[in-house]
Structure formats: C-alpha cells, structure tokens
Amino acid sequence: MLKIEHLSCGYGGPPIVKDISFQVKEGEKLCILGPNGCGKTTLLRALAGLLPSSGTMELLNNNLRTMPVRQRAKKMALMSQFSPATFDYTVYETVMLGRYAHQTKGLLSGESSKDRHAVEESLRLTGTWDLREHLVTRLSGGQLQRVFLARTFAQEPQIILLDEPTNHLDLRYQVELIESLKTWSCAGGRCVVGVFHDMNLALSFADTLLLLNHGQIEHCSKLDDFDLSLLDKLYSMDVRGHMVASLQRWV
Ligand SMILES: Nc1ncnc2c1ncn2[C@@H]1O[C@H](COP(=O)(O)OP(=O)(O)OP(=O)(O)O)[C@@H](O)[C@H]1O
C-alpha cells in the first residue's frame, strides 16, 4: 500500500535519513523504533511531505511527491507529539477541522451530512463523544490528545502517521488509544506507521518493527519473526533484561 524506495531527507545539510526502502501493506501497523536523534520524526515528516526528500514515495501506486496538498490530506494524516490547543473551539468543531480537505465551501461553513457522520464516528471511536460541547482550551492534556486522534480519524485518511501519540496519556487511555487505532486499521484500505518510545506499547501495537539507527534501517521484520535481542544492540543495553526485571515488581 505504501512503497518507499531509496528515500533520503534532512534539513538542508547532510541527509538525516539515508537511502531507506520499506513497504507497508494494507491493514499493517508498522512501528519505527530507534534511539534519540536517529531520525524517526524526520522520516515521518518527510513521509507527510513536510520536508524535502529524494527517492520514491507511493501510496496505492500514486506518487505522493507530486500529489496536490489537499489530495494528500485526504489520504494521509500526521498526528504529532503534543500540540497545545490555541483557539476556543469546542471539541466538535476541532474534530470537524479534520474534514477540511473534504469540504468544498470553506472551513466550518459547508459541512455535509457525510462530514457530520465522520466526526460523530470519530468522537465515539475515541471516547470523546461526551466532551463534544467542551472547549478544547479547558481540556486536560490526555483529553486533548484523544481529541486530536478523533480529528485524525475524521480526516478519513488511508494512512495515519503517528509520532509518539501516547505521551500525555495515562495508562488506561494509552491502552484505549492503541485499541482504537487497531480497530481503525482493521477496516479495508488502511495502514498505520507509528513511532513509540514505550517498548511495551510498541510491541502490543505493531505487527511489523522497523529499527532505525543513524538514519538507516538496521532491521525490518514481522513481530512474529523478530529477534528481541536486536534491540540490545540498537539501544546499547540489555532491553529484555530491563523489561523483565521491571515487570517482576508487579508479580
Ligand atoms: N529542524 C531541524 N533542523 C535541523 N536539524 C534537525 C531539525 N530537527 C531535527 N534535526 C536533527 O535531525 C536528527 C534527527 O532528529 P529526529 O527528531 O528525527 O530524531 P528522533 O529519532 O525522532 O529523536 P527522538 O527520539 O529524540 O524524538 C537530529 O540530529 C536532530 O538534531
């Protein structure tokens, strides 16, 4: 569904992400893991068209590089790390902003029944229905994060790019966000590419792991075939030993 070949990108100097290739299939949830500064966010931003890049980027055989912005926004959504609410919109209005690329008469003025249906579904899927009349400036960080996820769903993209979306969520909402993303990705013609620092969340979410180091792919495979000891080299520590030791405190 998503085909990336020989992608390089950066910020004007030497490339940060260097000549990487991978594919994501329909229904797949690919998780990018790697140490701080290895280029995870840079890669997501290049996929979203926010950075200059070279190489091939195709979604369902359509060239993402030459796709008009509005067309791209109908196919792809980027949910970044926490961004504050700056306007006194209600939750409903904020989620409706996700419909921008689909609206023809202008923002918040020409919403159709299809727009309203997409927003209502998204509010329900993210557990924010009861908050719909609340002002986003009065929400907690975790509530706001779920509203941003609802806005992402309302955009009805085919691929969601996630950059550490669970940062501000308590454990229950982390689990709920992961579950709602799994539910979302099950419908046909969709996939997710995500960056998670929390290894437990990554393993509970992904079906494919891509290990990035110094802007290059060290390994990419299905979770079922993945050798967890590869993480030790990536993070220069005994990852499994650390995880097992910390989990034993719960027993
Ligand atoms: N706007 C920018 N201009 C120039 N260099 C940048 C910019 N943003 C990031 N970088 C550099 O690009 C490299 C990769 O950064 P990036 O944010 O992609 O890493 P990351 O893997 O997402 O890190 P983290 O796990 O800490 O979030 C770093 O060396 C960083 O300093």
Image (spheres, rainbow, N blue to C red):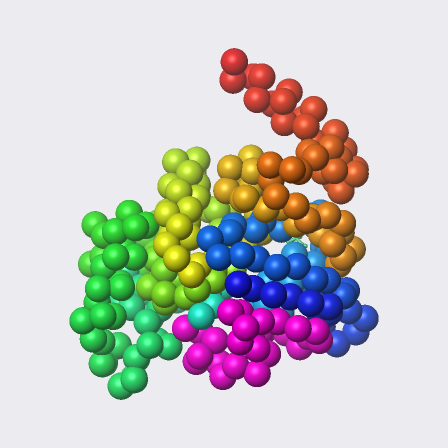
Residue 183 at x, y percent in the picture = 37, 47
Q: Residue at x 25, y 70 (%)?
A: 115
| Location of residue 153 (image quadrant) | bottom left
The vertical placement of 120 against 168, above or below, is below
Residue 195 at x, y percent in the picture = 58, 51
Residue 105 at x, y percent in the picture = 27, 86
**Any magenta on residue 165?**
no
The vertical placement of 77 against 176, above or below, is below
Residue 130 at x, y percent in the picture = 21, 50
Q: Can residue 247 be seen in the rendering of this structure?
A: yes
Residue 193 left/right relative to 145: right
Residue 128 left/right relative to 142: left
Q: Can residue 45 be seen in the rendering of this structure?
A: no
The vertical placement of 144 against 169, above or below, is below
**Any magenta on residue 67?**
yes
| Location of residue 51 (image quadrant) | bottom right
Q: Residue at x 52, y 60 (%)?
A: 161
Furthest toward the bottom, the residue is: 105
| Location of residue 172 (image quadrant) | top left
Magenta segment: 49-74
Q: Residue at x 74, y 38 (%)?
A: 230
